[in-house]
Amino acid sequence: MIIDFNGTVVDVDVNKTREFYYSDDSVEIDCTCGGCRNYIKYCDVMPLEVSSFFEKIGVASKKVCETYWFCQKNEGKAVFGGGFFTCVEE
């Protein structure tokens, strides 16, 4: 599947990507840091457009490889963040 991210073109092998996520124990199981736990909770309420995109390219959104957080409030709650995901390329 060819995906164009604003000029960066990637050819994702959706089936192999999906196989990777179903065979890999990732952050969903291993990491207990606050950022990863918050991200996993966000996955349950993320916009349908985002969750559908992950599904379309074979990525299990709760199995993020790494999360990062910045711009925190006084209570230590992250306001902005992101993560890295694995895709298998054709």
Image (tube, grey):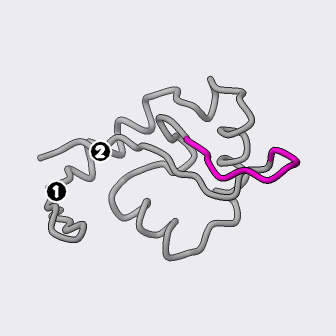
Residue shown at 52% from the left, 29% from the top = 26
Residue that carries the numbered disc 1 in the rendered image: 10
Of pointers 1 and 2, the one earlier in the residue sequence: 1
Residue shown at 85% from the left, 49% from the top = 74
SS for callout 2: loop
- Between 76 and 30, the residue placed more toward the observer is 76
Magenta stretch in the rendered image: 68-76
Residue 7 picture location, percent across and down:
15, 68
Residue 84 picture location, percent across and down:
43, 43
Q: Amino acid at mark 1?
A: Val
Pointer 1 with pointer 2, Cβ within 8 A: yes
Residue that protrudes farthest toward the top in the picture: 30
Q: Is residue 34 left or right of residue 23?
A: right
Is 35 a magenta residue? no
Residue that carries the numbered disc 2 in the rendered image: 87
Q: Amino acid at mark 2?
A: Cys
Is 69 a magenta residue? yes
